[in-house]
Image: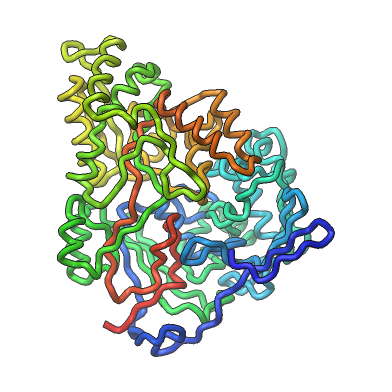
Amino acid sequence: MKTITRSLAAGIVGVALASTPALATHKTHPVTGEVLSDNQTYTYVSIDESSSLDPGLIEDVSGAAVARDLFEGLLTQNADGTLAPGVATRYTTNADKTVYTFHLRRNARWSNGDPVTAHDFEFAWKRAVSPELASPYSWYMEIMSIKNGAAVINGEKDKDELGAKALDDYTFQVTLEASLPYFPSMVVHTTTMPVPTKIVNAFGDEWTKPGNMVSNGAYVLSEHVLNERQSRVRNDLYWNNDATILDKVTTVIIQDENAAFNRYIAGEVDQTAPPSGQFNALKKSMPNDVHTNPRLCTYYYNFNMDAAPFDDKRVRQALSYTIPRDIIIDNILQGGQIPAYTFTPGATANFTVPEVAFGMMTQAERDAAAVKLLAEAGYSKSNPLKATILYNTSEGHKNIAIATSQMWKQKLGVEITLENQEWKTFLATKGAGDFEIARAGWCGDYNEASTFLDLVNSESGYNDSNYNNPVVDKLLAEAKTMSDPNGNYTQIEKIIADDMPIAPIYHYTGNMLLKPYVKGYPFNNVEGNWYSRNMYITAH
């Protein structure tokens, strides 16, 4: 957070946030002096269609990236991940930091010309927790510790009792159940963005379609062809439109990573992921295009603990121990990823990765322990464990599942069936618990360890393994109000490394191919949050 003033008065702390200087449209960049391209269109690849374009329903990384273009929340982020002003120019909080009051800019407009008001935020937040919307991310509003959040989500109280209200058109106040040290960073998230009350009420489920959608971000939706492409163009009514340089941003859906790479080489797209196994070679042949940086993300497998034999810890442990993490990283991905033995990655702010027992073993020791564990559970090569790995369509996910299943077959005699589904179907299947082992990836919603560990809370909406450990729940609850919760986080990581509801496989690095003429991408933001309004294309 860029702080201009910080004053103490009558128990209230006031924090003013710096804003970006206005930039007019130029032939050269008004700050760097670089010559700009006449064509300010940025096209990038996504392997899956967004789960939704409704901020209250989005549950995936690709959808969140689109939302950051179309909508603006109370706060946003600078290129390094620090907080920056959004619709709110500043906020104040009381002495014990249980009441946050956000002061909104008066020149924020919806793309239809209506003012963006505190009432739109109140409407959006109450809508997000409402049983009527049934948001897959309503749990996020609960872990924000908003007063009555849990009770509203559980149907015990009316949504109007949520501790979020407009004091007037330009003052939005949030009351928490208890102080949460990282609360301001949580209001960057998609679920907390405003939605246009009038438009949502008028169009219902159809409000996010082109022609219906009204947004308050730097861009507006101009085209959406399901599972093919989606475009957004500059919003002339965005309060800081003079600072925007890119005129158009297009997402193209390409599930075949090699096809996407070929289109990148042909100059048809400006950004994509390196095909699996080609990162190191491309780093040598295309050094100006290849980028890598730490990411706040973990790739893992969920075990469905409600389905036998995955209700047996020994089975879960045996399978996790024998996952070929080094082979996956060195032979398949080849992008500098980090083997994962804990859920929370080391890139997380103020988090020290603990040593967990199975992570300290050699692979030979893990393999030997796994054979013994699976035998104790009643399985052997003559009486094999049979299971299915579910993953969403992607060559990378497929290759990881193949390598893992082959290793399980070789070392444990386990017989695995692979099942892939397109993204939305996959999310629905996993959410319904209709799986045995399911591929998963989690990127932090904010930069604090709880963004990962809250997923193993028994009440979490994304506890897909159906894991329930009262000790973990208690440690998580205590951590919320601790000035240094690392001790609790260490205990939780050690517990789940033993209970093994999930099998962490690797911590991500942000590997991408980006055309050298595309500038302004925030490589130093470990959360991976990028805003098209801060990017631009130089002459090439």
- Report the residue at 36% width, 17% height from top: 308
Residue 488 image position (x, y, % from top left): 55, 34
The spot of residue 82 in percent (x, y) is 53, 62
- Viewer-proximal residue, 24 or 480? 480
Residue drawn at x 59%, y 57% as measured from the top left: 200
Question: In the image, residue 177 lies at what x, y percent?
Answer: 71, 41
Q: Is residue 515 above or below residue 343?
A: below
Residue 410 visible to the viewer: yes
Splitting the image into 4 quarters, where does residue 13 fall? Answer: bottom right
The colouring scheme, among rainbow, by chain, secondary structure or one colour, is rainbow
**Dividing the image into 4 quarters, which one contains the C terminus?**
bottom left
> Of residues 86 and 486, which is closer to you in this image?
486
Q: Is residue 192 visible?
A: no
Determine whether 391 is above or below 531 in the image. above
User: Can you say which quadrant of the picture contains the N terminus?
Assistant: bottom right
64 w.r.t. 455: above or below:
below
Q: Residue at x 49, y 36 (%)?
A: 455
231 lies left or right of 128: left
Task: Name which residue lies at 41% across and 28% down.
Answer: 497
Q: Nearer the viewer, residue 498 or 160?
A: 498
Looking at the picture, how far across and down is residue 348, in whole percent? 46, 48
